[in-house]
Image (spheres, rainbow, N blue to C red):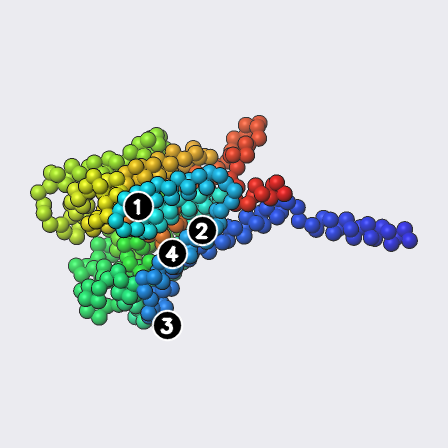
Amino acid sequence: MTGSSEMLSSALHDHQIAVPTAPDLERTQYRLWLKAVYAVVVGTLLFNFVLAFVNTNVFRISESHVILSEMALLAVALFLIFSRNTLLLLILLLYFSYMALILTLRPELDLKAIRDFLIPIVFYLIGRNFRQIEDADRLVWISALVVLSVGFFEFVFLDVYTGLVSIFDYYVARGTLSADANFIEGSNLFVSSTRVDGRNFLEFLGNVRASSVFLEPVTMGNFGAFLCLWALFRSGMRYRSLMFAAAFAAVILPDARFGMFVCVAMVAAAVAGLFLPRVTWWSLPLLIVFALGLYGGWSTQIGWSDDFAGRLVHASQLLQNVTPEILFGVDGNVPFLADNGFAYSLAQIGAIGLIALWTCYVFAPYEDQRAIQFKALAATYIALLMTISNSFYSIKLAALFWIVAGAADVVRLSPAKPSGRRSKPSEVAEFPGSERMKRA
């Protein structure tokens, strides 16, 4: 009888040990949440590619399919950060109130303006819930693997690739291009996917510029510059040299001359970011806009050519189209400004909203001093991209960028020095729902 009692007691004891503790449940919940975040980011990279495949092989895609896909991804991302976080609710309340104010002053409702700036808010806040920088490393590596795998397949097996995905037909179907816009007869690629005058880098690779899952080469080059940014910032990352190699490949495959220029500029920013204050990087976009204005005023060139100097002339000319109404985001009849991200941003959200959001990011609290270096790299990257286009607002690149930007602010990048004190609750990065679990 005594032996039976001991066996029963031992079994109960073993059962109690097997019961997950609150920290175990919290870690499991965080891992599941992290996998969901990874899935959303991969979805932002792939959804255009998938829609193009469907348009080529299943049924015709329209603009509404693209909009619904983006809305679905953004809705899931919003769900992943929805909690009883009063700061999050306050930020969203202020943002939607401001956007409602300026949109009521326009003759037509423009939901795209809301979407453009909701993307950085939502994905940055997701990144601020990362617990360790290695989680961001993993996300960047997954994204690089997806993009480069498709990019190399496209480059090596171009005929097979275009048979599966007719890129030009997809952009015609969604209303971005007209059917007569393709100046390369018989090509199924994007209109800028062929260098008519030959490549800028490694001419033996031919005139075709890879675009991978992005379907157009410019974003592929911008993605390569982003990989360079992350490799410059993450000095302690494993296989860092491979990240630089991936960045180089992602710039060379689309023959992205501007992407290469951005990489070179960020090398200087990585050094300067170690000692220059944040206000320097906050003012960088303003200084570039001022310089563009002066350049446009002094230049006597009327037309513009497809080179770096020509694009600067074009960008400065677009800035000259900014009226007081556009400056404050209340003009409903805005001319084409997409080739200058600064002018486009002013038209969408106004100077007040734009400066407020930029200030919130640059001066957001951080955990590690080296986070300022990331802000220096981010300011350089964003300012240069916005000089010649509004492509940075595309979710297929912005989602990944803003998640790692948030992570860079809240995680410790180097071993902490012993201080003999406990961290305050506000210093610990947590994920949505963790507070509810603690209360439980």
Question: Alpha-carbon distance for marks 2 and 1?
Answer: 24 Å
Report x, y in % for residue 391: 29, 51
Above or below 248: residue 190: below
Name which of mark 3 and mark 1 comes first in the sequence.
3
Of circles 4 and 1, the one toward us is 1
Which residue is pictured at 55% across the width and 32% down the height?
423
Q: Looking at the rendered structure, which numbered label has been put on residue 77?
A: 2
Q: Amino acid at mark 4?
A: Glu
Residues at marks 4 and 1, CA–CA distance in whole angstroms:
21 Å
Q: Which residue is mark 4?
A: 70
Q: Earlier in the sequence, mark 4 or mark 2?
A: 4
Q: Mark 4 near mark 3, Cβ–Cβ under 8 Å?
A: no
For label 3, the residue is 58
Closer to the eye: label 2 or 1: 1
Q: Residue furthest left?
A: 300
Left/right placement of residue 34 relative to residue 231 reads right
**Which mark is first along the chain, 1 or 4?**
4
The amino acid pointed to by label 1 is Leu
Q: Which residue is mark 1?
A: 103
**Residue 359 placement: quadrant:** top left
For the residues labelled 2 and 1, say whether their Cβ atoms are less than 8 Å apart.
no
Q: Could you tell me the amino acid type at mark 3? A: Val
Q: Are marks 2 and 3 in contact (CB under 8 Å)?
A: no
Neighbour tally class for label 1: few under 14, some 14-19, many 20 plus, Cα within 10 Å: many
Q: Which of disc 1 and disc 2 is earlier in sequence?
A: 2
Where's residue 145, x and y in %? Answer: 41, 56
- SS under mark 2: helix
Name the quadrant of the C terminus: top right
Q: Residue 281, image x and y in percent?
A: 32, 35
Work out whether residue 263 can be spotted.
Answer: no
